[in-house]
Image (cartoon, grey):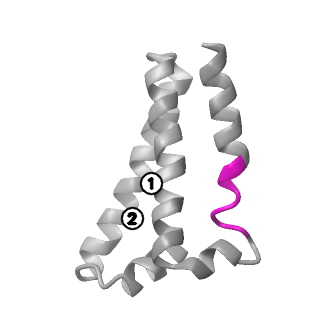
Amino acid sequence: EWELELATTLHLPGEPWLLIGVLGVAQLLSGIGALLLRGSPLRWLLLAQLLALLVLPTAVGVVEPEWLLHPFGPLLKNVPLVVGSWLLYRRC
């Protein structure tokens, strides 16, 4: 829900396209996770995951800085995921 709210503050195109874009990004990240479980080229997938975990929250934080201080930490929750992904990447 907060992704849709953020996207509307960015004045992105109309509601149907907005929803499609948010769901598309979610599916992309889910696909990366599924490929990781399948055992596909792990190093490349971990790099893609790290890139997504770093770029998307950074972009959101630049555009809407109040999300960085949100009480439920929607952006800070990615920190342990980045650390875990980096550790897995280093072990490959």
- Mark 1 highlights which residue? 26
Q: Main secondary structure of the magenta part?
A: loop
Q: Quadrant of residue 21?
A: bottom left
Residue at 63 percent of width and 33 percent of height: 85
Q: Pick whichever, 48 or 4, lies toward us.
A: 48
Q: Is residue 18 magenta?
A: no
Q: Secondary structure at mark 2?
A: helix
Residue at 47 percent of width and 47 percent of height: 52
Q: Which residues are magenta?
A: 73-79
70 sits left or right of 64 in the view: right
Residue 3 badge = none
Compared with residue 43, is residue 73 higher up or lower down, i.e. above or below?
Answer: below
**Hey, what amino acid is under mark 2?**
Val
Give the quarter of the figure containing the C terminus.
top right
Residue 24 image position (x, y, % from top left): 34, 55
Q: Pick whichever, 51 or 2, lies toward us.
A: 51
Q: Are marks 1 and 2 in contact (CB under 8 Å)?
A: yes
Residue 1 visible in the picture? no
- Mark 2 highlights which residue? 22
